[in-house]
Amino acid sequence: MSRAASHAEAAQRVAQLRGEIAAHNHRYHVLDAPTISDSAFDALLRELQALEAAHPDLVSADSPTQRVGAVVAGGFAEVRHDVPMLSLGNAFSDEDAQDFFRRIADKLGRDDIAFSVEPKIDGLAISLLYLDGVLTRAATRGDGSTGEDVTHSVRTIPSVPLRLFGAEWPPVLEVRGEVYMPRAAFEAFNQRARERGERTLANPRNAAAGSIRQLDPRIAASRPLAFFAYALGRIEPDATWVQHTDMLADFRRYGLPVCPQAARAIGLDGLLAYYRRIGDARDQLPYDIDGVVYKVDDIAAQRELGFVSRAPRWAIAHKFPAREEQTVVEAIDVQVGRTGAITPVARLRPVQVAGVVVTNATLHNENEIRRKDVRVGDTVIVRRAGDVIPEVVAVVLDERPADAVAFEMPNACPECGSQLAREGDEAVLRCTGTGVCPAQRKESIRHFASRRAMDIEGLGDAWIENLVDLGYVHHVADLYALTLEQLLEMKRRADERDGVVPETVKKGKVASRWAENLLAAIDASRKTSLPRLLFALGIRDVGESTAKTLARHFGALDRIASAADADLMSAPDVGPVVASRIAAFFAAPHQREVIELLRARGVQWEEGEPLAAAGPLLGKTVVLTGTLDALTRDQAKERLEALGAKVSGSVSAKTSFVVAGAEAGSKLDKAQALGIPVLDEAALLALLAEHGA
């Protein structure tokens, strides 16, 4: 046998083995219907490993032998999502689900609406990018616009195909789904850990998220993770699916695992029947869920319904009632938030609720604590609202101690002694010591450094507490003036205060890598974007979405800072309350001083011209309806806003004109009834071209 012939035969056998191993992997991990024994599967894998070792040029990224790669150096790379990974709105009752259905039925003009329905898996949202059928990248959701590259960990999950099955998949296919840890696998993993005296995992959800966000892929490979696909991101060429359920069927054909409980339901009765059926089976399912998800099945109808802020109008998560347990209130404290809000918190005797040990629960505000009459010593019912945030549901009055006394809110801030006050008739008490209150200062720095704001990695709670308490940081701009000597001195002082034995000095040097890394992270955050900076500043009621709107509308921080309330309200979705909050923030001298110090200490952000400045459509209100061929709805909105128009979601007498694409619905009817001008897509494109947008 010639060397060439031997190599050709090896290549043929390698391809055959990879196909067989992938098929057996799919039957075992996805279909739960293996057709060979574990030893026979291992023999196939060993044969493939031997052939690849003998012929290194045959090794490829999609080989089953390459699932576990090298440790990632330098941390997680940032991934910008071409199509944003949106979150879902929540329904917590049948009435909420009915309202969701009625809104859709009213917009579509019919009640016989079909939905794709599935359990809401309690795991970590992940995006998988397949190029020419090969898994090329995996990324976390992050803030919806930007996530982290976790390809090295996701490749280790056996149910994630490294190469799609068949040959009819699109050349570019981005699939969204959930990484989770099956219950039985979680329990087995913890049992083995207990037997070895190792640390156990807290719950399946945290275990899945923590496993994926490890730099060493061997950690993810050692943990029993799985994946379900449920949505589409980017696709080229454009998708031709008519129904969402058609897409899921093709996902299954490609070898992608889809939840076996995913189904189709018709109308409101169908949705609620599915919700109850899955709820009844919840404890018997092999994975943790916290509700079910409803999605309008018709993809054209999804486009018609569109989006609101960070969520689609055509989908919602119907949450199950929170799991509840009883425990005892051992103390009631108050916490001071970033905006000065005073929140009473119950300190609880530790209790496990839905797989998580709960020691604290929010009591929300003074009105709520009075309504529930929660007292120290009370036995209370605790639940994790939405299966996430612990809260006190009610007091078990029959078990109240005789000496329990009603809780009284303090008159002054427990952190700085400033007076507490309310704004108008709101229920929340607030500390008036803005700028001097250490608690507000700490929360502001936490928010400023958070991943969706300035993203200062390594600036954790303990460092923030010490930086503020020991006087090194008085506001966020001080972070950019910190030195290595100050950080080392801070740690030494904190250790002395806490009675901690200082770290051993080695070769005449104190360990300083942590401080160097923190300074590097602070330095890296100096270059940011205007939306991130606006969000990081912590302006009350200005979240990520509003920050992006302000940045896009005004283009520059100084324009926002100097804008009057009426000017601020010209930005989409900025009402009088938010406008007044923004104006008050920038009117405060200490906030102006902080911004100038940020600039002076090298913080930079990109700025541009305001979208509405002298735009030819300034003062015009436009409504988009129907499906456009040449543009997405978001692209059309962005171009119209660039010309100064305000794009609204509903037709009214104030609407200047409506753009109607294919399958336009009730908005077109209303526009015609009101005599409002209607442009088709060709007229819209001509208008945009005329003004160079």
Image (tube, grey):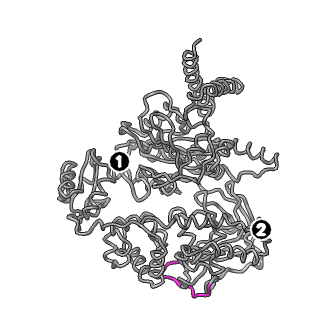
Q: Where is residue 147 in the image (x, y as percent from the top left)?
A: 51, 53
Using the rendered image of the protein, determine whether residue 411 is visible from the camera's viewpoint. no
Q: Main secondary structure of the magenta part?
A: loop
Q: How far apart are marks 2 and 1 (CA)?
A: 63 Å
Badge 1 is on which residue?
A: 303
Image quarter of residue 617: bottom left
What residue is at 34 percent from the left and 43 percent from the top?
A: 300
Q: Residues within 10 Å of mark 1 (few under 14, many from 20)?
A: some
The amino acid beneath tag 2 is Val
The N terminus lies in quadrant: top right
Foreground residue among 97 and 616: 616
The mark closer to the camera, 2 or 1, is: 2
Q: Is residue 629 above or below residue 480?
A: above
Image quarter of residue 192: top right
Q: In this view, does 66 lie above or below 638?
A: above
Foreground residue among 410 and 252: 252
Badge 2 is on which residue?
A: 505
Q: What stretch is highlighted in magenta?
A: 416-428
